[in-house]
Amino acid sequence: MWNFYLFRLDRLSLLMIVLTSIFGLFSVFCEWHSKQKNSGIFYSFLLLIISGMFGIFLSLDLFLFFLFWEMILIPLYFLIVFWGNINKNKKNNIFIAHKFFIYSQLSGCMLLFFIINLVCCHYNYSKIWTFDYFLLKNTPVSLFTEFFLMFFLLLSFIIKIPLIPFHSWLPDVQECLPTTNSIDLIGILLKPAIYGILRFNLIFFPHSSYLFSRFFMIFGLLSTLYGSIMAFSQKNIKKFIAYSSISSMGIIFSSIYSFNFFSHQGIILYLFSYCISTAALLIIIGKIFSHIYTQKIFKMGGLWNYMRFIPSFFLFFIFSNLNIPMSGNFGGEFMMLFGIFSSFPFLGYFFILNLFFSSIYSLVTIQKVCYGLNNNFFIKHELSFFDFFILFFLVFMIFFLGLYPSLILNFSFNIQKNIFQHYIFIK
């Protein structure tokens, strides 16, 4: 563990920073040969987002955490407005950017409201003004106040995960952003909310979290089923991935509130592997877009007729997202569902039903994208050396996490042990 005044690096932070660094590099490499307008400013904004993520994961001071939380909003807003690629429709890009900005501001306001109230509660108790994480987490408050504070903090994170009914910004932003930023959105921006719940909600409010755990699990289940059902009807491949992400985030959210140690360990493994397979899918979609200039599923149809390598990678990564055996996704989701089923057997049946839905929508998408007839000409040189290197590395990572999950599980053991110390005390 490394400490530097207001910053600290522990195992949970280290895991998140490693994952952020990997996707930060890949997001640059996957568009190495692409010509971005004003590339200097574009990559400056990208670096600002990654720096903000590092700040979020390292901050021990709640005010600093809030500053970094808000810091990533501004560069992402300008990336959507100036580099959004949805048919080059500037008005639509601005509308999506405003929508994202309003949702993010709502999340930020909830977070700031929580911080100010908690600091005031601590001052009333100790007569000390502080934003220190370790001092604030031991602030004694009544059960009503605890529930009040937990509600605002959790709402802030739920908007950023996102879960229904706060999800509508994600499909639009995902569709609009170029490949580089789409990878960041899945691999980088969705993690801070999960990190925040593990770092703050469960540690600061174990009692209220436990009391409302059944309600939160149902909330996550609804989001899971809604995401799966919406994925069926998508005509845009990036919106399809966005809704499947909402479904997966619902499972993670429910697993957090299952308060099962086995399930919590599965969260870390699944998050790691899911981010890798989804980022790889976005790279593949970016490559398809660079050749045929469309994200429409029906226009992509018959990939096997005009490409050789991209359809193979597409099949592998979409099957990884479907949690095939020997992938890290499979191990992580099995652990999460096993934990949910152990703690709440009745709700567990509905989560298993979602596996059936996700299988159907994934197979339907594979059929539409890879098979059938298409008038596109056969494309040579569909992937560069860099692309092959990145995609093979991601394939290796998914198999490695599936065949050797103990590397992540052993590393994350102490993280979950610290969280469960609070829970066992309450129980």
Image (spheres, rainbow, N blue to C red):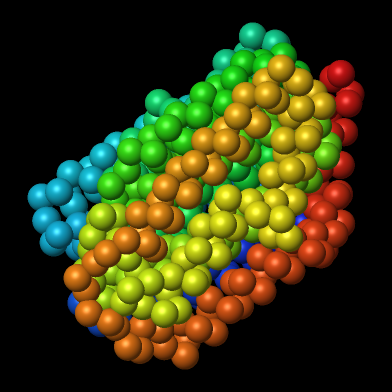
In front here: 255 or 122?
255
Can the viewer see residue 276? yes
In front here: 10 or 367?
367
Can the viewer see residue 153? no
Q: Residue at x 26, y 40 (%)?
A: 99
In front here: 161 or 418?
161
In screen coordinates, is 291 left or right of 67?
left
Looking at the rendering, which quadrant does residue 137 occupy?
top right
In screen coordinates, is 59 left or right of 172?
right
In front here: 308 or 46?
308
Residue 288 against residue 87 in the figure, above or below: below
Q: Residue at x 49, y 41 (%)?
A: 360
Residue 106 against residue 50 in the figure, above or below: above
Looking at the rendering, which quadrant does residue 42 occupy?
bottom left
Q: Residue furthest front?
A: 373
Residue 54 percent coordinates (x, y): 57, 61
Residue 121 against residue 187 in the figure, above or below: above
Q: Quadrant of the C terminus?
A: top right
In screen coordinates, is 407 left or right of 196?
right
